[in-house]
Image: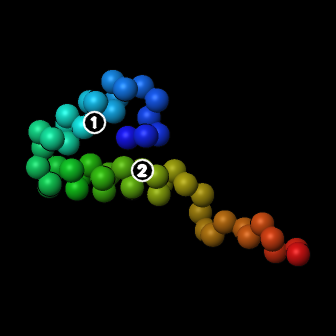
Amino acid sequence: MQLVRAPAVAERVQAWAARTGPVPQAVGLAGALTVVDVLGPAGVAPFIYFGF
């Protein structure tokens, strides 16, 4: 977990992943992806080099 600056958070996530099986991990990942999708912008992001 290189993106998390607090070591305690990374250690808690790793401990949770070690304790749980693949099904709860898949449900957690699906939930996280759903939250990101719901909170993200609608449509396709504009291409920044469109005018060039």
Q: In the shown orientation, is residue 26 left or right of residue 50?
A: left
Q: Amino acid at mark 1?
A: Val
> Where residue 8 sits in the image (x, y, percent)?
33, 24
> Would you call the spot at circle 1 few (<14 residues within 10 Å), some (14-19), or many (20 or more)?
few
Q: Quadrant of the C terminus?
A: bottom right
Task: Decide: is 26 above or below 49.
Answer: above
Residue 32: image location, x then y, percent: 36, 49
Q: Quadrant of the N terminus?
A: top left
Left or right: where does residue 10 sit relative to residue 44?
A: left
Residue positioned 46% across, 29% down in the render: 5
Which residue occupies the foreground of this view, 5 or 16?
5
Kind of residue sitting beneath label 2: Val
Residue position marked by numbered label 1 in the rendering: 13
Is residue 7 positioned above or below 26 on the image? Answer: above
**Which element is circle 1 on?**
helix
- The image's mark for residue 52 is none
Q: Which disc, if any, is residue 35?
A: 2
Quarter of the image where one finds residue 22 = bottom left
Alpha carbon separation for disc pair 1 and 2: 18 Å
